[in-house]
Amino acid sequence: MVNKRYVVELTSKERQQLKELINKGRVAAYKQRHARILLLTDENSGRKHMTNAQIARAISCGTATVERLRRRFVEKGFEAALERHKSRRQYEYKLDGDAEAHLIALACSNPPRGHKRWTLRLLADRMVELKVVDSLCYQTVRRTLKKTRLSPG
């Protein structure tokens, strides 16, 4: 048997909590999946040990999920293993309030010569031409106009 790097050893109280969580009707699916994985990875359960691949097949998830959950349990504890992983990614907004106001004013103005109406790409290109922003994706224009309930044209 291969030595496991992260060994899950549940107490009887934790095991009981997981069983109750699985049997409840109104629990998020990811929590039930995490509980099942923890129960199957438990070294103190007294039953035959399963590999990560066997557990992944039994739960219908990836082996990486099992490995990450083992690691989270060992490093951060029981409660952290039941919760979702919090993203640390931070998003920066391209358009501040002034730039949004400029975009809205532009969308309400007459379209450029040769065009019947503003398109999202035209608006994005014009914002860059006017040096309001250094670059702008048409999807950002779409989200901003949707937020303000405006449509180009």
Image (tube, rainbow, N blue to C red):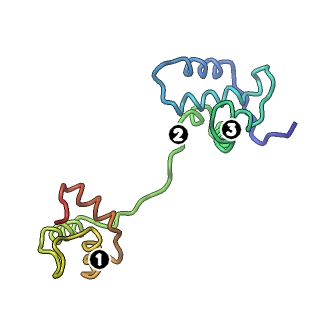
Location of residue 85 in the rendering, given as x and y in whole percent from the top left corner: 54, 43
Which x, y percent locates residue 3?
84, 40
Q: Are marks 1 and 2 in contact (CB under 8 Å)?
A: no
Residue that mark 1 sits on:
125
In the image, is 24 to the left or to the right of 65? left
Residue at which label 2 appears:
84
Crowding around mark 3 (Cα neighbors within 10 Å: few <14, some 14 to 19, many 20+) is many
Mark 1 or 2, closer to the camera: 1
Quick check: 129 above or below 94?
below
Q: Residue at x 60, y 35 (%)?
A: 81
Left or right of 23, for residue 117: left
Q: Is 43 placed left or right of 1 in the picture? A: left
Q: CA distance from mark 2 to mark 3?
A: 13 Å
Q: Residue at x 65, y 21 (%)?
A: 15
Taking depth in this image into account, of 131 and 56 the one nearest to the observer is 56
Question: For the image shown, how many numbered marks are present on the structure?
Answer: 3
Q: Quadrant of residue 70?
A: top right
User: CA–CA distance between discs 3 and 1?
Assistant: 48 Å
